[in-house]
Amino acid sequence: SHFIFNLFLISITLFQLNHLIKRTDIMTKFLHSALAALLLTASTNVAAFSVHPAGHSLAKSTGVTSTELNAIGVLARKAKENEVRQWCEAGIDDSIMDKVKEMKANLPTLPSAAEADASGAGVGPVQKSLTKRKGTISVIAEYKKTFIVEDGFVDDVFAPELMSPVFREFGAKGVAVLADQRMGGCSYDELVKVVEEQQSAKGEMPEPVPVISSDLIVDEVQIARSAAAGADAVLINFSVAGERTELFIQCSRAVGIEAIVSVSTQAEAQAAIDAGARMISVVGVDDVDEKVAVVTDLKIPDGAAVLTIATIIANDNKALEEVEEAWVCRDKGFNAVWVSDCLFKIGNDPSEHAGAIIRGMAAKSSVKWASAKALGGKGEGAREYLGDILM
């Protein structure tokens, strides 16, 4: 198992290097080799916890992901399972065990997604917070400690409790915390600090915004851990969770938090909705029209409301076309955008820092009247545009 885990870490490192040197062919060959070795040596996974309730049938695997996405999902899942197993063996805090017990106790009597939709309980406070009137877009700002930029790596981002109020005060409607340290994220202790900072703003304007735990969920105990940390929602990756997506959604509801399911294809999106997901995030898709295709013509259950989120991938330059992409996603019907690396790639310039980018994305401007490429400081009137739109 250590060999498998180390193999995955090497693949991630080479992926990051590949991002810098633009050698996709080398990375593709490596991933294929790594996957082959993994499939030959991996043993059957035993989850750290099993809280499957009697009478709750789970969605079966639909085979909706492509072979390549499944390959990456297998590698990621195996590495994370190993990490979670080691964490459990080291001892689990009482507050987390209390959430595990709460989860087990509530699951057998938990209303189905259809029953929740019919009663009006299908839309939780996080979904309500992110759902705005037509013609507007909500911004989910994700905090992470390390990320890739054009010239290398950045690992000196301000502490999460310092960035949390910036996100809120500049208009973010949700704060996500990448809680996977091996992928450049934070510890759960730092997730707690973000939750506490948001709660400290109660009674003030702007009000606290929901906090989303963005870990790679492979076991129910991670959901319990997120709930114990005070998170309002968790992110579930469909390509990793697979047939356990429905269970993870139910487990989230059982401890009083909401679930956002990330998908990459229309088939995954439909399977997630059928499993009870009411917030869908499109990930791993660059083109806006392709993002739209993922959430188009989905069969929504009667009485259900589904929130759609477009994940915006950072470009390898300092021109902030990502703001323009947020406007296009808004005009194409998405309810929200999820942004991460692009918030930090300019640094802390007074007119182009993370808060200014969030405000720009939430602005009511349009690509019909302005170009966000001016945000990079290139072109006539670039700084004036920043002053008008962002500040």
Image (cartoon, rainbow, N blue to C red):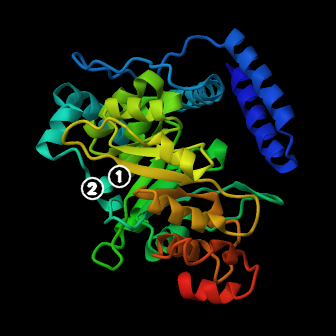
Q: Residue furthest front?
A: 368
Q: Which residue is mark 2?
A: 125
Residue type, label 2: Pro
In the image: residue 213, left or right of residue 102: right
Residue 376 visible from this viewpoint: yes
Q: Quadrant of residue 251?
A: top left
Q: Nearer the viewer, residue 324 or 336?
A: 324
Earlier in the chain: of badge 2 and badge 1, it is 2
The one nearer the camera, 297 or 108, is 297
Q: Looking at the image, which is closer to me, 44 or 372?
A: 372
Q: Is residue 116 left or right of residue 230?
A: left
* Residue type, mark 1 in image: Asp
- Image coordinates of residue 314 in percent, x first then y, are 66, 57
Image quadrant in which you'd find residue 75: top right
What secondary structure is found at the residue carrying circle 1?
loop
The answer to whether residue 92 of the structure is visible from this angle is: no
